[in-house]
Structure formats: structure tokens, C-alpha cells
Image: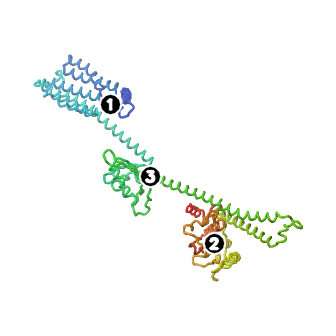
Amino acid sequence: MIPGLQDRLRLAASHVDALVHPGAARDEVARARHGAFIRGHLACGALALALLPMLLAFNGVTTLALALVLGWLTAHLPLAMYVSRSGNLARGHLASAVLFAVFFAGLAGLTGGLESPVLPFLVLAPLEAALAGSRRAVVAMVGLSTALLAGLWMFAHGVPTTGAIGGVLPVTVVAIVLALLHAALLAVRLTTDTRLQAGRLAEASRRADLLGGMIGEAVLRHAPGGQVEAVTPSAAALFGLAPNTGARELSGDGLFARVHVGDRPAYLKALSDAAQDDTPHRIEIRVRKGASQPGEAGQAAHAWMELNCRAGADGQVVSVLRDVDGEKRLASERDLARTEAAAAQDARSRFLATVSHELRTPLNAILGFSDLLRGQPSGEGGTMPTVFAADPARTAEYAGLIHQSGSHLLQIVNDMLNMARIEAGQFEIRAESFDVRACLDGCRRMMEPEAAKLGLRLASDLPLALGTFSADERACRQIALNLLSNALKFTPEGGRVVLFARAEASGLVFGVRDTGIGIAPEDQDRVVLPFVQASSGLSRLHDGAGLGLSVVKGLAELHGGRMMLESRVGEGTCISIALPSRGTRARPARGESAIVPTLQQDLKRSA
């Protein structure tokens, strides 16, 4: 096309588009339909105005048939202006169809009546009325065409057929040209409407797919049996499938095969319930992602998805799938954090209650007896109250009580420091070979005076063939002393406590068993937590900060070993420590705890 002509046509089209009513200009489809109607009718009117001078010049005084043709073409101009001013396209199409029917009926009446060759083109009138988008308009147009045919039969019956209009233009040629012109306009409008509607549907589908892909949703349509009949392209990304195969893999029973076996009954029930009522149904199901099939290596894990389904207007069930796996994981992490916070708060409360009680009791004794020692009048030389100078036994007794209380305080502080160092990963394990029997027997001898004072029998079961073992001797000694101290504390007078050890293929096992009060099954997981005793509260029968078993468990785990507890209420307790022979684990880096995960799990169990 010539560039100059092309620019002029574009300029003319822009002027015509400016004639579209403002009410229709806001919508792309409506603007295109109004523009097509206005352009077509303006073209017909312009054609009439262009033909009129030539016909008058070459044909002279025109005939009635030619005047009818020119009048019909010229009438398209006011129709275009009406639609431009009113914006009522439906009435414009109906008026155009009426004008066409009247014109061809009149032309047939002038050129042969029912025998006129132009009469068959009257069928185009109802087709144009269909563009109005109203069944009533089509019925009215059919009624008008029928009435016009009846009029021709009554008033134009027997009219001789005219071979030419004005003696020059054959009637058949003129009718065919005009009919083709009108049919072309109708075809253009129909094509425009179809193309615009298809474009709108495609754009809406693209936007829905884009939106669904961005928010991670897939829309599916189900058959009465639950099979997938249609699925949006966004489902491929949701399920991690290839875009060109995603819809095929999910169609039919493909989605059902991906639903977790345990969730399939709920999935089918939700679809069935949605098909039977008009209410939405929402469930959460586990669905397999990825292209792998069940049983294949590398099969993707199931992910949680939310299924919202509801029956549509046609009775078919439409469902929306949304990936909620991340939300479930965040919810789980939030619940875990809440549990850990509650456990930490509970541990803090236990720490404050236990330590305040354990510190107050020996401090009261220390302060009270020191006040007695320094509160009496000074004797000769002013170094000792006279009452104690005269009674050395009482002085020794009070001094022993002060020493005992101070030792108790020192033990609590040492246990707290050891527990803090273990949890912070700052308790250094130095593995060296040492004589196991000599180490453990020394611990037994250290605790013999305490056992004798409590009226208990302290025995040992230490085979001579124990030999040496590579571990931290200091930590093993502390473990043995803590276990013996606990056993003596919770064993009634006349009971028996045994320190035992044995060498196994996997390493060293040693521990303490007693005939004490025992630990109830529901308390056995709690007693290894810091600042916890089976009998808690300020009224408990036995003193102690509840750190002994926590320190033992931490030291055993720093060696890569474990602590085992067996107990029955009223029969006694046996606590064993198993240390592996392959050597201690690498010492944690500074600030890292080797047993923090285990302690956190223990805190959760106690919460």
C-alpha cells in the first residue's frame, strides 16, 4: 500500500473512532463493535453520495427503482449518526435490518413481485437483527419479513418482471451487488464480534492463569465421578510439571493418583458433597508433586494443599487447589517456638524456685551460727565467746554445721557452673587412658563416711579385669560421685547402694544401683532436666538443686555416650552410663553446645 494513502486511511479511521459514544468507548469490545457499525454505514452513505452525480450525469432523470437504491444507501448515514449519538447499538442493528427488509421488499415489488430475482435476499434481514443480541428482535424481524412477503403476494401479484433498472442496470446484478455488500458488512461485524470475544476470553484466561500462577493456585473442573475434565495451565507450575504435559498428567484420574492414600476418602467425599449441595467445601490434603511415579527413585515428597470445591451453575464441580505446605511448616515452627518459649519460662521459674530455696537454707545456717559465734561477750583475750571457750564440743559442732552448709553451697554453685559450661559447649573433654577400677573405687571410698552416717551399705561390683579406658577421668569421677550422692540421698536407712562397672565390646558401662524410693514412670523423663526433682516444690523431702542427673547426662553425651535409667517405685533405681570405646567426640567449638538439642527436647517433654 502507498505510504501516503495508508496514513490517510489511519487518520480517517481515527476520526471515525472518535464518533463512538463515550459510554461504549470505555470498553474495548463495545468500542470495536460500535466503530465497525459506524464505519460500515458511513461507507454505504458515502457510496450513495458518490454514485448520485454520476448516475444523474449518465442516466438523466432516474427511475423509481434507482431512487429506492440510492435512498436505501443514503439512509445508512442517519443510522450511523444515531448510534454515535445514543450509543444504542442494538436499536441501530434492528433499524438497519428493518431498513434492509423494506428496501428489498420494495425493490421486489417494483421488479416482479414474488417472481423478482431480488426476493431471496430478504433472508439477510433476520441475520442482521441477530446482531442486536435479542431473540425478540429476531422474532420481530421474521414477522416483518413475513408481512412484507404477504404484502407482495396481495398487491404486487402478477407485476411484470423488469429486466433492468432505468433500462441500464440489470436487476439481478444490482440485487446481487447490494446483497453482497450488505452480507460483507454483516460478515465483517460478525467476524469482528467473534474475534473480539475470542480475544477477550483469551485475555481473561491469560490473566486468570497469570494470577493463579502468581498466587500458586490451579482451577480444575471435575466430572460427576471426580475425574478431572479441564485444568488451568497454572497447575503445571503448582505441581512442578512441564507446561506442555501438566494438563495431560492431571486429567482423568491423574490428580486422584497423586493424592495421598490416607487423604483420598476425604478428597472424594468433598467432591461428592459439593456436587450434592450449593455450599463450598474446604479440606487440606497431601498431594505428590513432581513428574516421578509412585515407586520410582527420587520420588517427590507429598506437599500439603488446600482444596476448595463448589458446584457451578451447570452442576459440575469446580475446585481450586492452593499450596499451603509453607503455611503448614510455618505454623508448625510457630507452635514449636511457642512450646520452647513456654518450656524456657517453666525452666526459669523452676530455676528461681529451686535455687532460692537451696541457697536460703544453708545461708540461714551459716548466718545463724556465725552470729552465735560472734554475738557472745568476749572472753579472756577477746578471741572466743566464753560460752564456746568453755564448751569446745559445741564450738566444733557449730563450726562443722557452718562447714557443711558452706560445702553444700559450694556444691550447688559448682553444679550450676558445670551445667552452664556443658550447655555452652565450654566444658573441655580431655581423653586420656586411666585405670577405671582405681578411679571408681576411689569415688566409693570418698562416699563411705556419708553412707555410714546415713546407715547405708555402700558396696562395689568392679571386676579386676576392667583395665584402662580412654576418657576424661575427671568427668568420669564426677559422674560417679553425682550418682553415688543421689543414691545415698534417696535410699532409706538400712538400704544398699552398689557402684558397678563392666567392660563391653562397644566400650565401658558403669553406674549405680540402689534400693531407694524409686522414680515413678511419669517422672523418669523429668528428673534428668535441670532444676527438676520427682518431688518438686518447697515441701519436698530431699534437698538438692536437681542438677546432679543433668550434669551426668551432659558429661556422658559429651563423650558420645548415653545415660540409661531404670526404676520402680519402692524397689530402687539403676542408672547406667555407656561410653563408646572409639574415643570421645570432637570437642564442640566455643559457644556451641554438644547437647543443646537434647536438652531442648527434654524441656519440650516436661512442658
**Can you identify the residue that label 2 sits on?**
490
Residue 25 seen in the figure: yes
Residue type, numbered disc 2: Phe
Q: Looking at the picture, how far across and down is residue 257, in whole percent? A: 37, 58
Give, as a three-letter code, the residue at label 3.
Asp
**Residue located 57% across and 62% down the image:** 606
Above or below, 115 relative to 313 = above
- Reading the image, the residue beneath label 1 is 36
347 is higher (above) or lower (below) than 499: above
**Left or right, residue 523 beside residue 58:** right
The quarter of the image holding the C terminus is bottom right
Q: Is residue 39 above or below residue 497?
A: above
Q: Can you identify the residue that label 3 sits on?
A: 323
Q: Position of residue 361 (x, y in %)?
A: 70, 64
Q: Nearer the viewer, residue 488 or 517?
A: 517
* Label total for image: 3
Q: CA distance from mark 1 to mark 2?
A: 100 Å
* Image quadrant assignment for residue 562: bottom right
Q: Quadrant of residue 472?
A: bottom right
Residue in view at x 21 percent, y 22 percent: 68
Q: Which mark is residue 606?
A: none
Q: 489 or 74: nearer the eye?
A: 489
Q: CA distance from mark 1 to mark 3?
A: 46 Å
